[in-house]
Amino acid sequence: MEAASVHPHPVPGEGARAGTVAPSSDEIVKAAAWKPADPAPLGLAGFAMTTFVLSMFNANLVNGEGVPVVLGLALAYGGLAQLLAGMWEFRTGNTFGAVAFTSYGAFWLSFWALNVFYAKDIGGNVGHAVGLYLWAWAIFTAYMTVASLKVSGAVALVFVLLTATFILLAIGATGAHETVTHWGGYIGIATAVAAWYASFAAVTNSTFGRTILPTVPLRDL
């Protein structure tokens, strides 16, 4: 990847005027050859774990009184770690990864803030307000699903399942349908498993230097 800040042919006297020293040829080569690690496995792992834990509660598979345990994950792993993965995806030039990880990192941070600071101030029908919040994320996820169809089968599966999860949770919240919310929880668990697999495959294939776990690339289809 070419480093935009490096001028391979500096104008005579330019370094002196700016008070800097022109980079050596070795520095230019190193800057051009440097390649950052793939941040996608981190982003997927942060998303998967936080989604899994929350979905266990949404599916009513664990006692609902433990829901606050999700908030720590939402802030640190699903939120901050995934947000950082999104920022690092900008550096790799991956528009899809940058938009996806940054957005879902922001989602988990907003989920944390909503529960810690703002939920108590919602007036009127809380279910409708939360439903609107979830519908908005369902719309975003739906159009990201379209873009994911040129990434890989593993990533596309995550987005298809996540779209279904948001839709079910939005319906459940808007109409206070607990059964629909539970189904959203089950699909959310499946979403987390798919995201974990995509993360597992990416980090394993990168570490071994060859394809150990297939992700079914779709870019050439």
Image: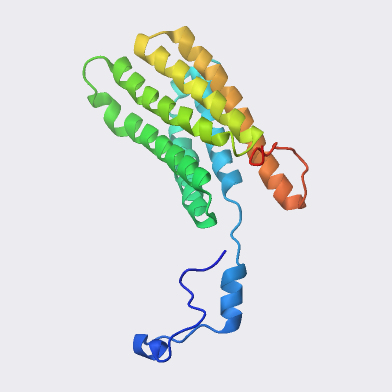
Image: 1 above or below 214 = below
Write the residue at 65% across / 33% down.
153
> Position of 110 compared to 33: left or right?
left
Image: 87 above or below 48 = below
Q: Position of residue 193 (x, y in %)?
A: 63, 29
Write the residue at 48% across / 85% down.
22
Write the residue at 56% across / 17% down.
186
Pick the residue in front: 66 or 49. 49
> Position of 28 compared to 129: left or right?
right
| Quarter of the image where one finds residue 221 | top right
| Quarter of the image where one finds residue 135 | top left
Where's the N terminus, which quadrant?
A: bottom right
> Seen from this angle, which residue lies furthest front?
221
Write the residue at 48% across / 8% down.
179
Q: Is residue 75 visible?
A: no
Q: Position of residue 29 (x, y in %)?
A: 61, 75
